[in-house]
Image (cartoon, rainbow, N blue to C red):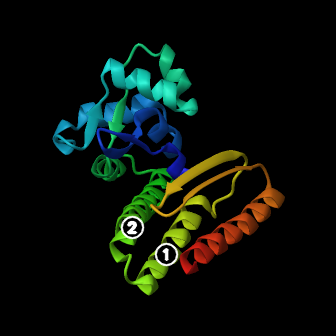
Amino acid sequence: MDVEDKMITLRNQQVILDSDVAELYGVQTKRVNEAVSNNPEKFPEGYVLMLDNKEKAEVVENFDHLQNLRFSPQLPKAFTEKGLYMLATILKSPKAVETTIAIVEAYAKLRELSRVITEIPQYEDDKAVQQSLMQRGGQLAAELLADNLPIQSSETSVELNLAMFKLKHTVKRENNDEIAQLKQELAELKRMVNDKGQS
């Protein structure tokens, strides 16, 4: 389950579209949308965003996994972190619980990574603190890239711009051998981040 791959930025928020939520939760998209329409009091403003036609066209253009939305007459909904938590209280299947835990962890790591990236330039005069922040950023990036759940096939691309250096890492995972290779590459990525922090 690659929760991070499903997160997109919309209106300056990290969200997951209804079709991706349905896939993650193992239900049909219409079941996700029924949960919202049947429980409007549980989804106040800021929990679910309705995309407009322009936003729909942008996500279809920018995210390959959302190409099928092009043919849908419906405007998709986007769930914010709060909306996903609320949805989990309605969709109570074991898969929904497992997915919600993964979503909570992914959002927490993204928030911390964002905070760390923001703080790195603030400690330009304190190299020890800056190095520590860079190491933590590398660790968080590795954790976001590494998925300990079984993977059949997925592709992950992460690009970090940390003021002092830019790092882009793309990995396609197919089986356990490639997962082992990914872990080696992540260790190398972490070493590169640490080395960059020391220079």
Left or right position of 154 against 75: right
Q: Quadrant of residue 64?
A: top right
Q: Which mark is residue 112?
A: 2
Q: Residue at x 55, y 52 (%)?
A: 159
* Depth order, front residue of 163/183: 163
Density class for disc 1 (Cα within 10 Å; few <14, some 14-19, many ≥20) is some
Q: Is residue 86 above or below residue 187?
A: above
Q: Return the residue at label 1.
A: 136
Q: CA distance from mark 1 to mark 2?
A: 9 Å
One can see residue 75 in this view: no
Of all residues shown, which one is farthest toward the right? Answer: 177
Density class for disc 2 (Cα within 10 Å; few <14, some 14-19, many ≥20) is some
Relative image position of residue 90 (x, y in whole percent): 33, 47
Left or right position of 65 against 112: right
Q: Residue at x 32, y 27 (%)?
A: 51
Q: Amino acid at mark 2?
A: Glu
Q: Is residue 100 above or below residue 67?
A: below
Q: Find out whether the residues at labels 1 and 2 contact each other: C-beta distance under 8 Å.
A: yes
Q: Residue at x 57, y 32 (%)?
A: 65
Q: Residue at x 30, y 43 (%)?
A: 12
Q: Is residue 24 above or below residue 190?
A: above
* Depth order, front residue of 169/39: 169
Q: Earlier in the sequence, mark 1 or mark 2?
A: 2
Relative image position of residue 55 (x, y in whole percent): 35, 25
Q: Quadrant of residue 182?
A: bottom right
Quadrant where the C terminus lies? bottom right
